[in-house]
Amino acid sequence: MIKDVMQGRTIGSSLLGELSSSAEKSSRGRQHFNLHRSFQDPCQRLLNAISRNSYIPPHRHAMDGKTETLIALRGAFALMTFTDRGEVQKIERFASEAFSDGNGVDLLGVEVFPETWHTVIALADNSVLLELKPGPFNPEAAKELAHWAPGEHDEGANDYFCYLRSLIYP
């Protein structure tokens, strides 16, 4: 649950649980919760619960030119970056401090530069990100999808997602 306190807000584990539960029920496998008050805020902040079966197509933020910061509040994730031709360039696992998968994950978060093709894959149930990005938010310039990867609902999306998952822990 999120609640206003004095001149700010608190974010509790019950809210993270509610978001995770909603993500599991969502057709996209994700549920976000905006912490910013408007798209005009100078810092866009949101919680993003991502289920293990959620395929986020590779994309970049070159049109808006803004760096994105992703911090694991709960669970574990893999950030995959790609070349301009769609070859996997790097896989960086990061997780909340409370999560231990025995594979030496010691990063809590990552920053993604605007020109970097990337996707994020949840590695654990009930995983939640804190996403931070400079504002204001312009939905028309927010995301450029990679032409070399299937879209979220395209034929072949599930096979491509399974392929990407297979690269995380070979």
Image (tube, grey):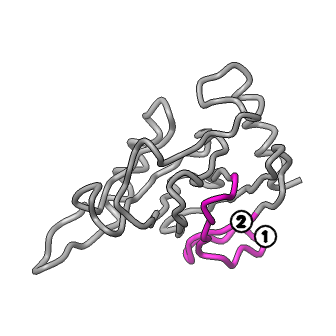
113 in magenta: yes
Residue 114 lies, in percent from the top left, at: 60, 60
Residue farthest to the right, as pictured: 170
Q: Secondary structure at mark 1?
A: loop
Q: Residue at x 76, y 35 (%)?
A: 148
Q: Amino acid at mark 2?
A: Arg
Question: How far apart are the alpha carbons under marks 1 and 2?
Answer: 9 Å
Decide which of 28, 139 is in the foreground and name it. 139
Horizontal arrangement in the rendering, residue 137 relative to residue 91 (left or right): left
Q: Is residue 150 placed above or below 79 in the rendered structure? A: above
The residue carrying pointer 1 sits among few (fewer than 14), some (14 to 19) or many (20 or more) residues within 10 Å by Cα, namely few
Q: Which mark is residue 53?
A: none
Taking depth in this image into account, of 98 and 110 the one nearest to the observer is: 110
Question: On the image, numbered disc 1 is attached to which residue?
Answer: 103
Relative image position of residue 157 (x, y in whole percent): 69, 28
- Badge 2 local density, few (<14 within 10 Å), some, or many (20+)? many
Q: Position of residue 16 (x, y in %)?
A: 38, 59
Part of the protein shown in magenta: 92-117
State whether residue 56 is above or below residue 10.
above
Task: Determine if the magenta segment contains residue 112.
Answer: yes
The residue sitting at 66% across, 71% down in the picture is 100
Under tag 2, what secondary structure? Answer: strand
Give the label on residue 93, or none. 2
Look at the numbered discs 1 and 2 and tell me whether their residues touch, using CB distance below 8 Å: yes
Q: Is residue 104 something that shows in the picture?
A: yes
Whether residue 70 is visible, yes or no, is: no
Q: Position of residue 120 (x, y in %)?
A: 63, 53
Q: Residue at x 21, y 72 (%)?
A: 9
Judged by depth in the image, the label closer to the viewer, 1 or 2, is 2
- Main SS category, magenta section: loop
